Every structure is written in structure tokens, then in C-alpha cells.
């Protein structure tokens, strides 16, 4: 991490302390768009998503979209995946090995807790964003596949050949919806997470 990145993270940390401590007023008593049943479930965790998004400098709409794609906002128990020989757990469907390495959480019981699961998933998203220099498409793909496989696939033919485009497109399209929902609840959303800075670009294949 260079000095510029350290300075940026320091500034974000300072801002995050203010927004977490003081909070942002709601602009309305209800979202301006009608949320689906799925979106209502996910937005039920909006306070935790907001807190960790601000803390880790990850747009809350992205965290919500990943949660939506991973668990549909349902607090899932441990699920074994044969292809990776590991368990995935909770709202953000985090692998146990990832939780241990990234968040120092080693037990399924702790990882099932929403506050722990969302914090760990958001921290992992931040690491993937850093790893891929802010390229959201690759970071989202890596959240599902791990950075190694995404990096190899993205370099095939000198272009971005993402191996899980359907998953990535689902997350990116839902991110736009969750951005609108969060903006309805938090007046300062665009100031803290301006669209120009958190640009996601076109969907893969569009």
C-alpha cells in the first residue's frame, strides 16, 4: 500500500467515525421505490451494512447486492462445498478458511452472527477491491471464486474473461437498485459514495 492509499484510507476512517457515531437522517419514512420481498429482507440489515460499508469504504449498495446474490437475505447455516472442500456460512456465504484468514473468525457459531458475518464479508470485499485496484467487476467475481482464479481468467487473451459473468451481472444490476434504496434512507449517501467514484460500468457482455 503506497502513501496515497494510506492517506485515502485515513481520511475515509475519519469520515466513517463521524457518520457511524452521528448517523445520517432519513430523507423519508419509506423508500422512494417499492422494494421487492427479497430487497426488504436484505434491507432489514441496512444498519449493519451501512456501518461496515462506511468502516471499510465499501459502498453499502454493493454489500447488499452481494448478500442478495449469496443468501437472499436469509441467515443460512454452514453449507459444505465439495469443489473447494470447505464450508460457507451466513448472510454473506463466507468460506470458513476466508473468515479465519481475513477476520480471525474460526468457528461457525461466531460466523453465523449477522454482525460478524456482514463485517467479515465487507472486509473481504474491500480486500478484493484493493487487489483488483478498484475494478468492481473483478472484485465481485473474486468474492465468489477467490482472487487466484479470477486473475488467471481475466488475463486470457489480454482481456477480461470473467468465468462467472451471470453472478457478476446479477450483483451489479442489483447494486443499482440497492443504491436507490439506501439513498432513500440516508440523506448523505451520494456525498459519501458518489457514483463517479464508485462507477461500476456496463454489465459484462453488454
Image (cartoon, rainbow, N blue to C red):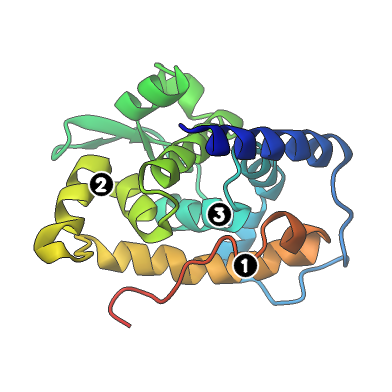
Q: Quadrant of residue 203?
A: bottom left
Q: Secondary structure at mark 3?
A: helix
Query: Please, is residue 112 above or below residue 19 in the view?
Result: above
Give the x, y percent position of residue 12. Answer: 68, 40
Can residue 165 be seen by looking at this rendering? yes
Measuring 76% from the left and 59% from the top, which residue is drawn there? 191
Q: Is residue 27 left or right of residue 159?
A: right
Residue depth check, mark 3 versus mark 2: number of the one nearer the observer: 2
Give the x, y percent position of residue 98. Answer: 34, 29
User: Which comes before the other along the chain, label 3 or label 2?
Assistant: 3
> Are circles 3 and 1 on residues that touch, CB within 8 Å?
no
Give the x, y percent position of residue 167. Answer: 32, 62
Categorize mark 3 by other alpha carbons within 10 Å: few (<14), some (14-19), many (20+): many
Measuring 15% from the left and 50% from the top, which residue is drawn there? 152
Question: Dot 2 corresponds to which residue?
Answer: 145
Can residue 118 be seen by looking at this rendering? no
> Are circles 3 and 2 on residues that touch, CB within 8 Å?
no
Which label belongs to residue 183?
none
Query: Please, is residue 199 above or below residue 12 in the view?
Result: below
Marks 3/2: CA–CA distance: 18 Å
Quadrant for the C terminus, please. Answer: bottom left
Which label belongs to residue 64?
3
In this view, the residue farthest toward the left is 157
Q: Is residue 170 left or right of residue 195?
A: left
Q: Secondary structure at mark 1?
A: loop
Question: Dot 1 corresponds to which residue?
Answer: 195
User: Which comes before the other along the chain, label 3 or label 1?
Assistant: 3
Give the x, y percent position of residue 54. Answer: 67, 43
Q: Secondary structure at mark 2?
A: helix
Amino acid at each position: 500500500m503506497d502513501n496515497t492509499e494510506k492517506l485515502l484510507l485515513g481520511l475515509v476512517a475519519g469520515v466513517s467515525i463521524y457518520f457511524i457515531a452521528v448517523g445520517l437522517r432519513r430523507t423519508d419514512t419509506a423508500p422512494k421505490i417499492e422494494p421487492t420481498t427479497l430487497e426488504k429482507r436484505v434491507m432489514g440489515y441496512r444498519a449493519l451494512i451501512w456501518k461496515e460499508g462506511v468502516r471499510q469504504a465499501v459502498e453499502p449498495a454493493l454489500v447488499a447486492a452481494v448478500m442478495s446474490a449469496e443468501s437472499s437475505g436469509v441467515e443460512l447455516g454452514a453449507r459444505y462445498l465439495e469443489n473447494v472442500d470447505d464450508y460457507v456460512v451466513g448472510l454473506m456465504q463466507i468460506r470458513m478458511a476466508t473468515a479465519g484468514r481475513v477476520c480471525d473468525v474460526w468457528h461457525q457459531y461466531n460466523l453465523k452472527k449477522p454482525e460478524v458475518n456482514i463485517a467479515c464479508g465487507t472486509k473481504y470485499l474491500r480486500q478484493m477491491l484493493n487487489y483488483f485496484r478498484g475494478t468492481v467487476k473483478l472484485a465481485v467475481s473474486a468474492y465468489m471464486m477467490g482472487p487466484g482464479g479470477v486473475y488467471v481468467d481475466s488475463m486470457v487473451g489480454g482481456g477480461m474473461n470473467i468465468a462467472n459473468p451471470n453472478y457478476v451481472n446479477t450483483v451489479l444490476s442489483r447494486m443499482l437498485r440497492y443504491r436507490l434504496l439506501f439513498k432513500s434512507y440516508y440523506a448523505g449517501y451520494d456525498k459519501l459514495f458518489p457514483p463517479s467514484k464508485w462507477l461500476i460500468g456496463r454489465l459484462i457482455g453488454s
